[in-house]
Amino acid sequence: MDLLPVPDADGFRSTDELADLLRTLRAWAGNPSYAELVRRISALRAARGVPPAECTPGRVTVYDCFRTGRRRIDMDLVLDIVTALGAPAPELGRWRRAVRGLLCRPDGSAGTETSGKALTVVAAYRRLAAADQRLFRLLALHPGDVIDAGAAAALGGLPVPWAAASLRRLGHERLLLPVAGGGDRGRDRYRLDSAERAFALRLTVAEDPHDVRHQALDRLVEHYGGTATAAAAGAPDASPTTPFWDGAFEARLAQLRLAGGDMVRAAAHARTALAIAIGTEDRSTQALALTTLGAAAARTGDHVSAERYYGEALTVAEALGDPRQLACVHQRFAEALEAMNRPEHAALHRARAAGGHCSGSFGMLAGVRPGA
């Protein structure tokens, strides 16, 4: 196989086509192992100045990019894989255009027939300014259907007047629908319907880095914490029954409930987060949710369930390949074991936690302060 595999001029019609071409490119490159690809990607990112803790993707995460049946795409990771497989720099633009075109497909899958509404959503998104596109993508992370300027400002990290103006522009493009009657104190409120939310979620997963999405969720939890006691009386209890949003929001709410001593609701939010994370293949949030379930079980005296949840969290974190997350699970497991009067086992997990640095979003969610 001498010719370099590249996307067709028409791009990809489905995520399966993308996976097929990645497998062809890997064969062209001599079938390097997934562990070798992880090593190459880590080196590429380090050369670009990416912080060391963010350089190395999980081996399973890289493998998943070559698997058919995927619904989510990390465009940056795909481009890193293509580079690691030896594609020359001039071809990266072609790959980027093809992947971006796939992300903007209204149905997000193969097929030539698309509804008029779906085509309208794509066209409306493309007409937006970059700042409005970014806010629209992040709105998919909101757990409820209805959003006001305060919540939008929190998600986007914007002043409230700017967020309000952006919501009006999104409403003008019919990407949001105004809610009759307005909101509290006369504030305008808008509804994000399921088709638009699904489109926005595909885009934010692909175009907004993991840390950007998690920081947006952190700000949203803080916003609701300031407007409703313990972030519990606002959007979380009015969430739609269909989980279109990022499960990390539910994981944060579970941690707030845990910190407040409400084990029942902490476990309920954690189970919701786990279900969403499994459905969206978000292993990071799976580990967070399982860790929270373990902590809630330990605090209610259900030591058998606590050990099972922590064990499952360790399995997920090990598969993910992130030493920070693995360290956090070990540390939280150690704390639970100490509360169970099992100091020998706790010492073992503390020793394993010492091999990594528990910090960042996962550390906060796992109940460990950065630098601990």
Image (cartoon, helix red, strand yellow):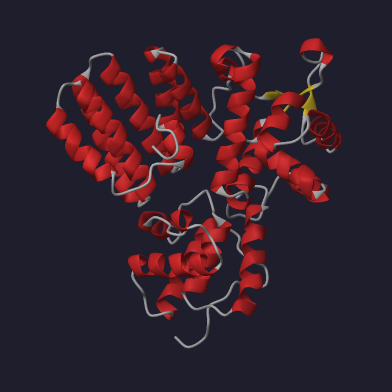
Q: Residue at 37% of width from left, 37% of height from top?
A: 287
Please, is residue 113 above or below residue 12 in the view? above
The residue closer to the viewer here, 273 or 219, is 219
- Residue 239 x, y percent position in the rendering: 58, 21
Q: Nearer the viewer, residue 147 or 338?
A: 338
- Quadrant (top left/top right/bottom left/bottom right) for the N terminus: bottom left
Left or right side of 142 for 253: left
Toward the bottom, the furthest residue is 2
Quarter holding the C terminus is: top left
**Quarter of image, res 175:** top right
Q: Position of residue 97 (x, y in %)?
A: 67, 65
Q: Position of residue 253 (x, y in %)?
A: 50, 23
Q: Residue at x 24, y 38 (%)?
A: 350
Decide if residue 263 is in sight here: yes
**Residue 120 appears at what percent x and percent y?**
78, 44
Q: Viewer-proximal residue, 76 or 174?
A: 76
Q: Is residue 306 left or right of residue 30?
A: left
Quarter of image, res 345: top left
Res 195 visible: no
Rendered view: 264 above or below 88: above
Q: Residue at x 63, y 53 (%)?
A: 103
Q: Which residue is outermost to the front?
A: 371
Front residue of 75/180: it is 75
